[in-house]
Image (cartoon, rainbow, N blue to C red):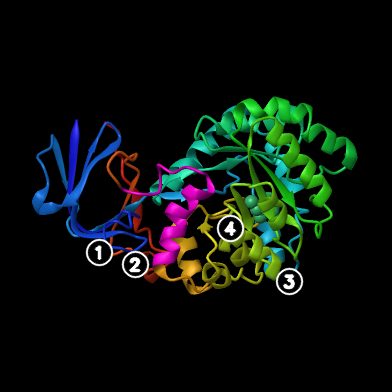
Amino acid sequence: MARLISGIAELVTNDPAVDGTALGIRRDAAVVIEHGLVAWVGSTRDAPPADTHVDAAGRAVVPGFVDSHTHLAFAGDRAAEYAARMAGSRYDGGGIAATVAATRAAPDDELRALLRQRRAELRAQGSTTVEIKSGYGLDVEQESRLLRLAREVTDETTFLGAHVVPPGIDRDDYLRSVTGDMLDACAPYARWIDVFCEPASPHAFDLDESRAVLVAGRATGLGLRVHGNQLAPGPGVQLAVEFDAASVDHCTYLSAADVDALVAGGTVATLLPGVEFSTRSPYPDARRLLDAGVTVALATDCNPGTSYTSSMPFVIALAVRELHMTPAEALWAATAGGAQALRRTEVGRVTAGAPADLAMLDAPSYLHLAYRPGMSLAHALDTAD
Ligand code: NIG
Ligand code: FE
């Protein structure tokens, strides 16, 4: 069944062939969707007939957001930790243990319901592709359970056993498990492996430990991702580039050598400004990365500790206001950038043959995503036949 959406005041395609810009904007545009794919893109006056018709009535349509970094598989919350932080305490990853305890105690059905509800919350705000990490189970049975349940709502699942060393467990024993029996149990449910490489945190992993995690993950056939340089300068970024990880995420404290490595390598720098907002930390220097030619993605990092938001529009508004990205750079980073961070070339754009992952805005232009912060302007379109 073919469905026509016409009367789109501004269609962002991320196809530079359209207008010579990265966003590839068409005015007064129309899209035909068939079998869940974009079948045709053009102007409203040239639109072919279709079985059903939606009038966008002067709204903008953008590629659905690609949220390439979330930790949606958790129970409980840490509102008190947030309040303490706003009163002056610093984030160091120690609170993760509280979420691990709450998550371990939650039965499958509760976690399944939480995952579905959060996945729906993301869609309702325009996100059509979502990555979900484990990392709040931290033993063989619990980590594989989280990934099995996350797999029910996305194909983009990431094994993050190397989130922190659980309290009371010997570091070396834990690392042996993460790179051994835990990895074996989790790999069938995961596309990626990630490590919190942060020598500045007593809970996270140093360079050699992180390297061991990436080596083991790669040998098991998983794609690689790294949490790096979040809390202090450190080795995460250069390690990620050395391993050709798809993405290194946070990138808050970067040296000149880190930026050079990102320019030379194929690793996307994913910025997560919801974290700096919610931990009251200095924002990453997006301009330095963009001006050097690094590919930048934006994601929510939705998690109960550092960034309890599932709103990509909020992240875009932060990126424009606080990271000095242009609205066009921010939208590209939240769509095509996220797709590159997941090495998914077919999503994050609106071109014939691509999945019909579209977000409709209750606004005439994508500029409103940053211009009207805190408003629910974006909604993923239901494009199933
Ligand atoms: O991406 N940095 C490590 N992990 C998460 C926070 C997890 C938590 O505090 O619960 C992050 O910020
Ligand atoms: Fe994270």
Look at mark 2 in the image and give the residue it sits on.
368
Q: Is residue 184 left or right of residue 222?
A: right
- Amino acid carrying label 1: it is Pro
Tell me the number on the disc at residue 101. none
Distance (Cα) linking label 3 and label 4: 29 Å
| Distance from Cα at disc 1 to Cα at disc 3 | 41 Å
Residue 241 picture location, percent across and down: 66, 53
Q: Say which label, 1 or 3, has the lower sequence index.
A: 3
Sequence-first tag of 3 and 2 = 3
Q: Residues within 10 Å of mark 3 (few under 14, many from 20)?
A: few
Disc on the earlier residue, 3 or 4? 3
Q: Quadrant of the N terminus?
A: top left
Bounds of the magenta span?
Answer: 328-350
Label 4 or label 2, whichever comes before in sequence order: 4
Foreground: disc 4 or disc 2? 4
- In this picture, residue 221 sits left or right of residue 26: right
Residue 136 can be seen in this image: yes
In the picture of the structure, the residue carrying the numbered disc 1 is: 364
Q: Residues within 10 Å of mark 4 (few under 14, many from 20)?
A: many
Q: Which residue has dot 3 on it?
A: 88
Q: Looking at the picture, which amino acid does disc 3 mark?
A: Gly
